[in-house]
Image (cartoon, rainbow, N blue to C red):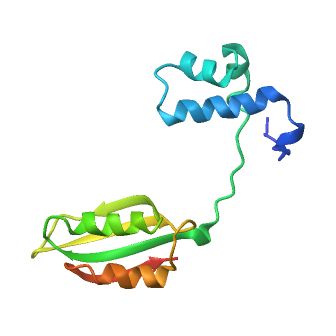
Amino acid sequence: MESTYLLVDKSVVPEVFIKVVDAKKKLSSGRYKTVNDALCAANISRSAFYKYKNYVYEYTVFDTNQLVTLFFTLDDVAGILSDILNKLSLEGANILTIYQNIPVNNTANVTISMRTDNMKTDIESMVEKLKAIDGVNKLDILSM
């Protein structure tokens, strides 16, 4: 049987569906030790949750224009990556992934993907601030 999907406004769905979505968020957060704890916090019965959990999902808009991937060549010195991450955090970037290669010839390549929708500055200004960090030898924007 082929699935058919509907996108329905939250204001008209049965309350149980809203509770299912809430319970799924609580479970995925890792803040609850057991399924029962999460279901209790979401105020939903186990039977209702298990009846609908594989059929009810929250629709989220994820604007890919808010994603930026940066590629760095860094000196192999302790603290440089930490300085980069601190600067990104202070400016409101949301780090999604960090990939660091093993250093070769005293340099390490690092790729950082992040969301920029809550940044306090534009990406070009941020790149200039990051390039100014001692030990950052090269910085390229891979995707934006």
Instruction: In the rendered view, tell whether residue 72 sits above or below residue 124.
Output: above
Residue 113 in the image, given as x and y percentages of width and height: 43, 65
In the image, what residue occupies the spot 73% across and 18% down?
48
Q: Residue 141 at what x, y percent from top left?
A: 42, 80
Asked where in the image residue 132 lies, by quadrant, the reply is bottom left
Residue at (36, 81) in percent of width and height:
129
Q: Up-down: is 140 above or below 43? A: below
Q: In the rendered view, would you say 69 is above or below 124? A: above
Residue 82 horizontal side relative to residue 71, left or right: left
Point out the image quarter for the N terminus: top right
Q: Is residue 68 left or right of residue 100?
A: right
Of residue 52 and residue 93, the one placed in the foreground of this image is 93
Q: Is residue 1 above or below residue 74?
A: above
Residue at image location 18% in from the left, 64% down from the top: 102
Residue 27 image point, x, y percent: 55, 30
Q: Position of residue 90 (x, y in %)?
A: 41, 65
- The furthest residue to the left: 105
